[in-house]
Amino acid sequence: MKGVYPWIYVDYKSNLWKFSINANGELSYAVMYNEGKWTKSSIIDSKATSYSIFIDDEGSIHLVYGNTKGELRYCTMKDNKWLGKTIYTLDNKDYEIENIKIIIIGSSMHIFYTAASRDGSDHGIILHCLWDGYKTNVTDIEDIILRDGIDDYYTIKTTYRNDICLFYLSDDGDEVSLNYSIFQNNRWRESKRLYGVQGEGIYFDVKLEKNSIHIINKSRENSICHLDYVIIDAYQNLKDFNIFSGNEDIREALIFNKDERIFATWLQDNTIYYSTFSEEKWDVPTVAIKNSEEEIERYNIFFDDRDSSHINSRSIYGTKGLDLFLYDPLDFLYTVKEGSYKEKAEIGLNSKETKAFKREINKIKEENRVLEERIEYLVSLDKKNKENIEKYQSQLSRALDQKRKAEENSNIYVELQKKLQADYEEVNEILKIKDHENINIKSSLDKYNNDLSLLKSKIKKYEVQESSLRQDIIDLNENINDLREEINIFKEENEGLTREIINFKRREEESNDYIDNLNKAISELKEENSVVKKEISLLLEENRRLNTELEIEKNQSVMERILKRRS
């Protein structure tokens, strides 16, 4: 199935949970406990089209999957039983759910998936389902054009501020474009096109850092397979480098960083290769793991380390079959042999690698703690929009004033440096003159030499100070840009509220006009009713008069007939 990788969860007891979907759409899992053998595979549900899992910090398993009915279902395990419910159903039954990915932030679950047409057309939609456990809010993020040979069209990453970044592919005809959007302040920003990739079998992976985006692209063009690297800095400047090109096919490329260096790994002929980016170029690819007997594939893994109170997830490599070897690109090796759990040589962690891995986990934990403090701080700021706008405007004014002062100080140091340079040249002239004088004034020359050394040291000192000031100016400019961006966001929100107020007042005025017209019409109807009543009264009176006259005439006629008979 497209873009569906097996999931591995290593819990705090070192039990292994393996989740997968087979070709028949059966979503199942198996567990390896202390005995070292896999349990019988248990089917969670059938007719599944895609799935993903998420492990929270308490070790609870959250599983979301789609089925052929177009349902998006959620289940979790409680008391060794799976409890599930349908949280959303596609309105259009002509589409199928694929490529599910999950992020939990706070008390809300963010579920991403693509809706692909069942009839094989090239139309697809990337959707975002926000679920708080009770109600869902589904947003169509982007319509995309699908292309044969692409299994996974998008990836999601989170920033240190818990903004969600979406990177996705769409077929533009002569090339496939890689695009970018961000979910910020509970709304999706307008998408931006980053660049285009030509060829077939396109695949990409992203590593997000605070001030840069690192991307690797795999493509095949004219029977040549290419693996390229693209870096985008904070100013949207783009650089690209080739990692590998050759006739051999490569798959499941990953990008990651370690010790502040960027690495890329990939599979080629059942062998794991890696390369390191250094000094503006990629090193020659190196074989990391060679396994000619068993097929290697990509796994997604959650690793629970209660010592660090942190659960980490990432993509790794592993072998297929009952004998499972997991190869972590960060040098973490977890080996499982069927039926040999008690042998430490068969299952365990290299002690040196374990310590390194735990240090890495502790480092990540500390980074997360700092990020959580930062998140709490930003949440408190978000509750005070107007105060924040005034605060940031004040900070912006102070920052501009500091920038102006820093520039003035920088100019002073430049002038001072020029003056010192002039003094230095003057001393040199004096030294040249003194060279022609007699030996008796040699002591004066020594003094001037000492002064010259002092001047040089001062020049170096001022150069260092100038460099520091220039860096301060750069930092201030970055802070100013950040502050301006946040001010613009608050202004947009205020403009939206203003428009809503204007619309409300307009609707209120229209309602008042309608009520006035209605009252006027009622008054006119009342007047017409009164006139009609008067006319009816006159008609009744006229009718009575006519009846009376008619009766008199009848009586007269009768009397006349009687009198005629008598006569």
Image (cartoon, helix red, strand yellow):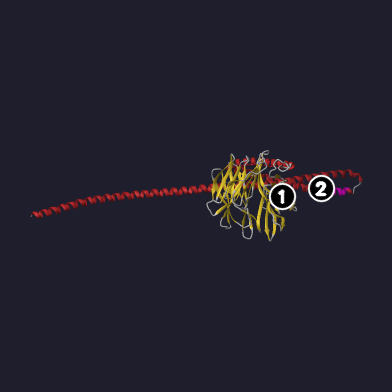
Q: Is residue 427 left or right of residue 247?
A: right
Secondary element at tag 2: helix
Q: Quadrant of residue 225?
A: bottom right
Helix, strand or loop status at disc 1:
strand
The residue furthest right is: 439
Q: Return the residue at label 1.
A: 263
Q: Position of residue 204 (x, y in %)?
A: 66, 53
| Label 2 or label 1, whichever comes before in sequence order | 1
| Residue 198 marker | none
Closer mark to the observer between disc 2 and disc 1: 1
From this viewpoint, which residue is outermost toward the left?
567
Residue 393 visible in the shown view:
no
In the shown orientation, is residue 99 left or right of residue 522?
right
Looking at the image, residue 195 sits to the left or right of residue 499; the answer is right
Three-letter amino acid code at disc 2?
Tyr
Amino acid type of disc 1? Phe
Q: Name the chief secondary structure element in magenta.
A: helix
- Residue 298, given in percent of the width and then of the height, sits at 67, 50
The residue sitting at the front extreme is 339
Tell me the number on the disc at residue 424.
2
User: Which stretch did the figure color magenta?
Assistant: 423-434
> Closer to the camera, 39 or 185?
39
Mark 1, Cα crowd under 10 Å, few <14 / some 14-19 / many 20+, is some
Q: Look at the image and say whether residue 539 sits in the magenta stretch.
A: no
Give the camera-side residue of 524 and 431: 524
User: Residue 50: percent from the left, percent from the top?
Assistant: 59, 50
CA–CA distance in space, label 2 to label 1: 50 Å
Q: Is residue 219 visible?
A: yes
Q: Nearer the viewer, residue 499 or 435?
A: 499
Residue 293 percent across, percent down from the top left: 71, 51
Is the residue under label 1 in contact with that under label 2 (CB below 8 Å)? no
Quarter of the image for the C terminus: give it: bottom left
